[in-house]
Image: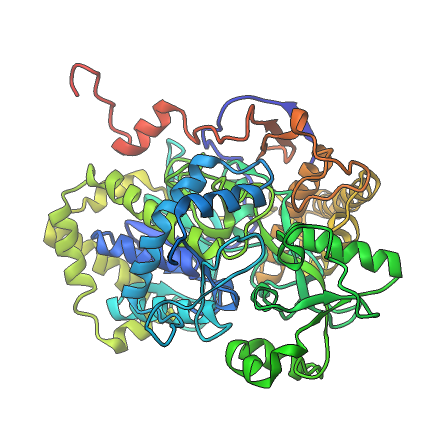
Amino acid sequence: MTSTGTSTGAGTGTGTGIRLHAPAPGWSVTADVVVVGSGVAGLTTALRCDAAGLRTVVVTKARLDDGSTRWAQGGIAAALGEGDTPEQHLADTLVAGVGLCDEDAVRTLVTEGPDAVRRLIETGAHFDESEEGDLELTREGGHHRRRIAHAGGDATGAEISRALVEAVRARGLRTVENALVLDLLTDADGRTAGVTLHVMGEGQHDGVGAVHAPAVVLATGGMGQVFSATTNPSVSTGDGVALALRAGAEVSDLEFVQFHPTVLFLGADAEGQQPLVSEAVRGEGAHLVDAHGERFMLGQHELAELAPRDIVAKGITRRMQEQGAEHMYLDARHFGAHMWEHRFPTILAACRAHGIDPVTEPVPVAPAAHYASGGVRTDSRGRTTVPGLYACGEVACTGVHGANRLASNSLLEGLVYAERIAADIADTQEGHEGREGREGRVGHEYGEHSQEEAGHEEAGHEEAGHEEAGHEEAGHEEGGHDENRLHARVPSPAAPPEKPDHPLLAAEARFAIQRIMTDGAGVLRSADSLETAADRLQRLHTDARDALDENGKTAEPGVDTWEATNLLCVARVLVAAARLREETRGCHWREDRGERDDDNWRRHIVVRLNPDRTLAVHTTDTADFPPTLPTAARDFVRTGGAPTPSPQEQ
């Protein structure tokens, strides 16, 4: 992919015509909204949509509790402590974002965040409390206040995931687990109409199918598996970003990949998910030291080890280069056994599992890919540039994080923007049918499910034909939803051609992509390293393209080949953006452009995929995000395609 030059204006979501090669769907389900992903963003969206009376289907790549949220150790940031304010949280977030945060988006986050956390607690999440019964707040890098709520010491994500999964199961939401989303379905007008997906399981839902819905929410998490070493689980292969690009959506700021400074070092050749050593350990007083025991972050930033993550990652990398070392150390021996066992039991267990005892020895650490600050570009309600397609959580780029995410803002972003997305979908579909009809139907479908029935649906065992018939019957009985109108707008996916239009990569290409990205687009980048990475990635694509053109064949469709193809897609976009941004800012560190350049680069890079697989690239005029949809397109979404009333009629 190469840049086609500068373009202006927001995309209209007309699609690219590029699809993953896959069998035709053999089953289908109909809903009002399909949420793809089961982390804090996805499950919060699903619960809020269900509460608004929307028939909601959750699709998740593994089990409900296997997403990135469960791995979050540190906590969730919000101005909940005495003396803390949203304005102070805003200030810390803007500093961490290094001039590229959208201030309006951040203000939304920090002002709506405290109540969103309280609602999470009402949902059933239990956070650690002091003896007086107040939230026990801690501090992490970039925060000038103790505002991080945590659970189980260092198991915050696991507790949030538990609470949300239990709430989803209690409400009987339809879920399809072990399902890899493939591509977006659109109607004749280019508006979202559902997704195709592949279920890896047993029963009638096995194989490729479709969920028909006028609203799709991408909450697929990150793309950390594009690098050799990451804190992300194996499922984080950039599927949501790749789907959005193929659907014609815009992505932004993909060059800003945050490398967590303190990941347990397992050896130079270690690949895949690596154990995280939470920033909260430094927040409680652990020190970064080199092999000689010297604290090298002193004097580099006023907050030393608690500086924003990009600064700490750079400090570690510089000292590693100076000393020819493969890692540095995190020294928290002064905590003592009691504190390690009660405040950081998960980290303690992970270290000991790898032969390291933090109670008696420093922990070897090095930076590893952790979080994508960029993603699918959205507005303040989570709307992308494709009508009806939303994005939330790490897959999205709301403008909150700028060039570097502030520690523990990610879970908060998932909460706040999930609620906003659910409200927008409910508002949009309110014009399509009466709320009373929706609520009556949802009571019929969900309220009477037994736990046994819910379990069958979660595993994807219920017969697809029966499910869809059940939806239609409920719609006709309640009179609130016109299935015929929906199906008229949603064409069935066409059978794939005998010769694929676009190649799939072989499964082993995944490891080649990871090595290319680690070598050329990791913590340290330069024009030369990025050019080499771009050339090597292009060769992978060209080889697959040539093989398809010469013999009409490509890799067999399957989870491994779809994931490798998605990884290549996001890797090429990331490298293209990193090559274009000729400065160092936040977690984008160019050795050959070591200074921040506000005159030329205090703006966002926005990328869209063309039908010929080249890139349409433009930069915003300011650090603020423009609207995702032109006024006419937004009216189209809100009216469901009906004519927009003239001013006299409104």
Q: Nearer the viewer, residue 578 or 609?
A: 578
Q: On screen, 133 above or below 566?
A: below
Q: Is residue 515 visible?
A: no
Q: Nearer the viewer, residue 526 or 43?
A: 526
Q: On screen, 488 above or below 297?
A: above
Q: Is residue 83 visible?
A: yes
Q: Nearer the viewer, residue 238 or 326?
A: 326
Image quadrant where one finds the C terminus: top left
Residue at the spot 73% in from the left edge and 57% down from the top edge: 297
Query: Is 551 on the left-hand or right-hand side of 473?
Result: right
Q: Position of residue 294 (x, y in %)?
A: 79, 66
Q: Position of residue 101 (x, y in %)?
A: 53, 38
Direction top: furthest residue: 648
Query: Is 613 on the left-hand or right-hand side of 90?
Result: right
Residue at the spot 24% in from the left edge and 40% down from the top edge: 427
Q: Position of residue 210 (x, y in %)?
A: 40, 54
Residue at the spot 75% in from the left edge and 63% down from the top edge: 295
Query: Is 642 on the left-hand or right-hand side of 355?
Result: left
Q: Nearer the viewer, residue 599 or 557?
A: 599
* Marker count (numbered): 0
